[in-house]
Amino acid sequence: MLKRIWAGVRRRPIALISFVVLVVLYTAMIFAELTTPYNPHTVFRDHSYHPPNVTLYSSEHGFGLQVQERVLVDQLNWRYARVRGEYHPVRFFVRGPSYRFWGLFETDIHLFGTEAPYAEDGRTWEDGGRNYPVFLFGADHMGRDLFTRVIHGSRISLTIGFVGIAISLTLAVVLGGLAGYYGGMLDWLLMRFAEFVILIPGLYLILFLRSVLSHDLDPGQSFILITVILSFVGWPGSARLIRGMAHSIKREDFITAAELDSIPPLVIVFRQIVPQMASILIVSVALGIPSFILGETVLSYLGLGVVDPAVSWGSLLNREISTLNNLTRFPWFLWPGVFLIITTLAFNFIGDLLRDVADPYYRERRLERR
Amino acid sequence: MNPLKLARRVIGQLLYNFRARRPLAAFVSGRLLSMAVLLFLLGLAVFALMQLTPGDIVENYIRGQMFTLGEFRQDDNIYTEEMIEMARERLGLDRPFYVQYANWLRQVFLERDLGRTLIARAPVLFLIRDRMINSLVLNLISLVFLTVFSFGLGIYFSSKVGTRIDVAATSTALFFHAFPGILMLILLQLFAAVSGWFPITAYPPFPFREAPVQFVFSYAHHVFLPLLGAFLSGVGGTMRMIRATMLDQLGQPYITSLRSRGISERRIYFAHAFRNTLNPYITSSANLFASLFSGSLILEIIFSYPGIGRLMYEAVRQEDINLVLANLMFISFLVLVGMVVADILLAVVDPRIRYSKQ
């Protein structure tokens, strides 16, 4: 398997690139407090809708990452003007707002930031003031750093896929495996139920469940609720696939042997049949994750998913903030969308490669046509 | 003989004769029957789910009615336990869910009335009818384009398999398939706003009756970009599927035997291989139809198209459970009809189906 994956990667390097990109994204997510210059709720007053201000070159500091100062010139339309000659180099591992790293210990080291004091009193973060802000991706409507919020938002957006697929695939394996192995009445009932869930257009079902289930939830509860709803809508497709496979594997000789050894049926299902489908399951994990990420995004975009104070990519794209007007004037509001695209594409490329590797007929078909 | 047994045998014999003489009609009626059963069960499940959380609905109802109905009016805008009980009784929520469901069914079928929305007190049927037609038109156009193009492209690229252009086409298809649909729509709307070539809404500002011809052109102009978005996210998956089934078919022995008899390549493609790709496509087209409705929900919201998806969204935002319920039932009904139509089409196209299901 690994050998064939490697051969596939050699033929399609984009899968390897996708993998590297995902590793970077997940690393940034795990160390979110460190990799971002501020906390997601650090507000810079009078910096609402501030454009990205990192540049690569200035006559003062030469080449290198630096921040150009801007002042607010138009209060109504939030227009900013660059201040000539006011550059602050970007430094690494600087002090910023303090946080509890993984909830373990208090620290205030951030991966990057400026060391220039901000505002008139000349104090830095340590003395209770603040440094001049680095807005890698600009600032949002309340003057919060968008880069910080995107990375912190990935904590929900990137994990909901794994949690969701874990729940829905467990359901699918248990129900599909049992239905396929036992057949008969149980099979009929479970498969009719699965078709029943499939036939309702997914988003309508999700919206209905969302409207029936409780509304006043704290962020943690709504995260769980969204995941459960999405998994409930997601399981039948893979359950049908797994049921079909279990149905055909059941006729193999080694299953008969196991039955003759009077191994209990449940053990046969989970120790003998399910491992046979490992490659298919891996593929459906890779291809299923993006749909969960997108499901959460759609819900949060509509304002029915993750809401303040929690952050996710969908809630950053929320339609009440990323209105058409705002997007045309402040195009950096699309950055969460860019991350979303990259993630879904990466998972799909990897999943596509894995599917080709897992499908034994694929190679033969290729060779035959050549 | 026991009369019950006799009746069963007679009915069974009748059914058997019916099936033997009119296989297609028997098949269709069987599908329709199962559709009715599924819809009935869906309604039951929905009402049972609603039973779980009636509190929200009632309080929402009271809040909505506080300013219009005299008996709910209070000086301090605080509602009491008695009022909650009264509202619950008025909404019929004090009864068990199957009774509520039976009442709802009676109302729908005998009085042709879906009730009124909880908040605006507008008749639901009136709200849904126009929106339903709008959504249906949009999704049918989308389905037709999707079908035509994915067949065209799928067959074309299956004949080019292994060449560079095929690799390029399949990777492009994968790209669009993987591209998040919601962002595609947002970007297209942004494009419309920045370039000014297309309107940013998806529906003409005047009704159809006013100027039918003008309306059609205006509609095409308005709906072009959103449909393009839906098309691009949909075509990748279906095209890849058709290409794969085409290749599967072309690898079968019967194609080789056709080739050996010197039948032209064109005929092999269109008369033989193509016909066999119809089968899996029609099977999946009901699911495609359902997913089109899901996709058009976002489309309708972003491009403010007056379809059923937007109605659903507004209903959910206002927590108007009557409207949500009616929407869900209607959309499932539509999808079920699509599924049954697909099944029947399949039976017409492929006679094996209707005989094998006996």
Image (spheres, coloured by chain):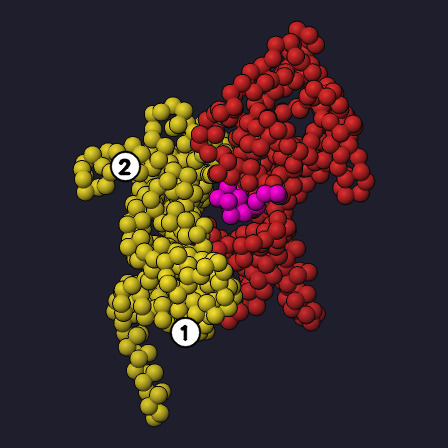
Chain colours: A red, B yellow
What predominant SS class does the magenta segment belong to? Answer: loop
Q: Classify B342 as above or below B108.
A: above
Which residue sits furthest top? A59
Asked whether B332 falls inside the magenta stretch, the response is: no
Q: Chain of mark 2?
A: B
Question: Which three-letter amino acid code belongs to the residue tagged 2?
Answer: Pro
Which residue sits furthest bottom? B1
Q: Residue, x 54% and y 57% (percent of image)?
A: A214
Q: Residue, x 37% and y 61% (percent of image)?
A: B69
Q: Residue, x 71% and y 26% (percent of image)?
A: A130
Q: Which residue is disc 2 drawn over?
A: B205
**Whole-number angstrom distance, CA of label 1 to CA of label 2:** 43 Å
Residue B278, horizontal then vertical, whole percent: 36, 47
Report whether A182 appears left or right of B248: right
Which residue sits furthest right? A105
Q: Quadrant of the N terminus of chain B?
A: bottom left
Q: Chain of mark 1?
A: B
Looking at the rendering, which quadrant does residue B44 occupy?
bottom left
Which comes sooner in the sequence, label 1 or label 2? 1
**Residue A147 visible in the snapshot:** no
Q: Residue, x 57% and y 57% (percent of image)?
A: A172
Report helix, strand or loop for mark 1.
helix
Asked whether A308 falls inside the magenta stretch, the response is: yes
Q: Label 2 crowding class (10 Å Cα cut-off): few <14, some 14-19, many 20+?
A: few
**On the same chain: label 1 and label 2?**
yes
Question: Which three-letter amino acid code belongs to the residue tagged 1?
Answer: Val
Residue stretch rendered in magenta on the structure: A297-310
